[in-house]
Image (tube, grey):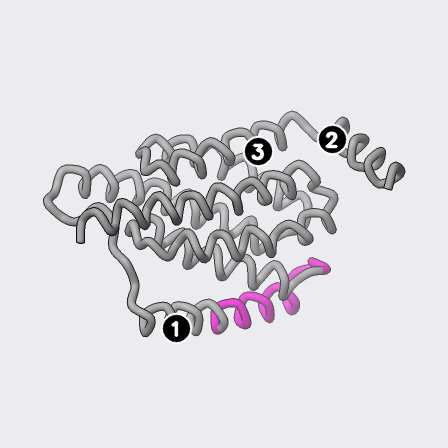
């Protein structure tokens, strides 16, 4: 156990300034999103661009593509949240059970396609794990931009799935960040659920 903790400490010491920047801004943007603060979007742009560089150089190509997608959704989310704040729409919407089942099916189909593409066309050693996490994140991020309550449940699930993947890639700080993300996402779900119920 002591050797393991020593190894973790050494990995923390070797964490690059770039990964620290990505981690801190990533933490801030998820925290602010959970609080429904629109500033999560510009801060997420910084995190996304930094992680794009990090993931590409660690051969996490699915995650690299995901960062490009996140960049687009950050711009869209910033616009959509601002527009919704000035409308009479309910601040948060919720999926039916049928819509959630359809969402899971979409994730599985997308994950299979991404996993196959990564396995066939890249040199990654984790094509299907990367593909599955990427697909789930794609869908969860889109639901967040649209302020759908269940986005947080998907984030809790995929954040937990990401932890062993980042450990495998020696991205310790990022793995710890995703544990924090899972906790924030759960709290975000509870906070958004209260807001949703108050408008029923």
Q: CA distance from mark 1 to mark 2?
A: 40 Å
Q: Is residue 59 magenta?
A: no
Horizontal and vertical percent for residue 184? 48, 41
Instruction: Say which quadrant the C terminus sits in.
Output: bottom left
Q: CA distance from mark 2 to mark 3?
A: 12 Å
Quickly name the residue at label 2: 12
Q: Tag 3 or tag 2, which sits nearer the N-term?
A: 2
Instruction: Say which quadrant the N terminus sits in.
Output: top right
Marks 1, 2: nearer the viewer: 1
Q: Is residue 121 magenta?
A: yes
Q: Could you tell me which secondary element the residue under label 2 belongs to? A: helix
Q: CA distance from mark 3 to mark 1?
A: 32 Å
Quickly name the residue at label 3: 23
Name the residue nearer the viewer: 22 or 198: 198
Q: Tag 2 or tag 1, which sits nearer the N-term?
A: 2
Q: Are marks 3 and 1 in contact (CB under 8 Å)?
A: no
Horizontal and vertical percent for residue 93? 25, 55
Residue plotted at (29% across, 68% down) = 96
Residue furthest to the left: 88
**Label 1: few (<14), some or many (≥20) within 10 Å?**
few
Q: Could you tell me which secondary element the residue under label 3 belongs to? A: helix
Q: Is residue 23 left or right of residue 150?
A: right
Q: Tag 1 or tag 3, which sits nearer the N-term?
A: 3
Horizontal and vertical percent for residue 166? 67, 48
Quickly name the residue at label 1: 101
Name which quarter of the figure residue 79 lies in: top left
């Amino acid at each position: 156990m002591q050797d393991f903790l020593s190894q973790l400490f050494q990995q923390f010491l070797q964490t690059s300034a770039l990964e620290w920047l990505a981690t801190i801004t990533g933490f801030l943007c998820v925290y602010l999103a959970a609080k429904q603060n629109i500033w999560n979007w510009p801060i997420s742009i910084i995190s996304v661009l930094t992680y794009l560089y990090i993931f590409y150089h660690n051969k996490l190509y699915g995650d690299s593509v995901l960062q490009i997608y996140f960049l687009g959704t950050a711009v869209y989310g910033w616009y959509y949240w601002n527009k919704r704040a000035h409308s009479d729409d309910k601040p948060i919407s919720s999926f039916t059970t049928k819509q959630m089942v359809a969402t899971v099916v979409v994730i599985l189909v997308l994950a299979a396609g991404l996993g196959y593409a990564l396995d066939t066309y890249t040199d990654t050693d984790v094509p299907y794990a990367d593909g599955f996490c990427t697909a789930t994140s794609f869908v969860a991020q889109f639901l967040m931009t649209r302020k759908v309550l269940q986005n947080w449940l998907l984030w809790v699930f995929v954040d937990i799935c990401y932890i062993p993947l980042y450990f495998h890639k020696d991205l310790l700080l990022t793995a710890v960040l995703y544990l924090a993300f899972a906790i924030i996402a759960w709290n975000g779900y509870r906070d958004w659920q209260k807001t949703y119920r108050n408008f029923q």
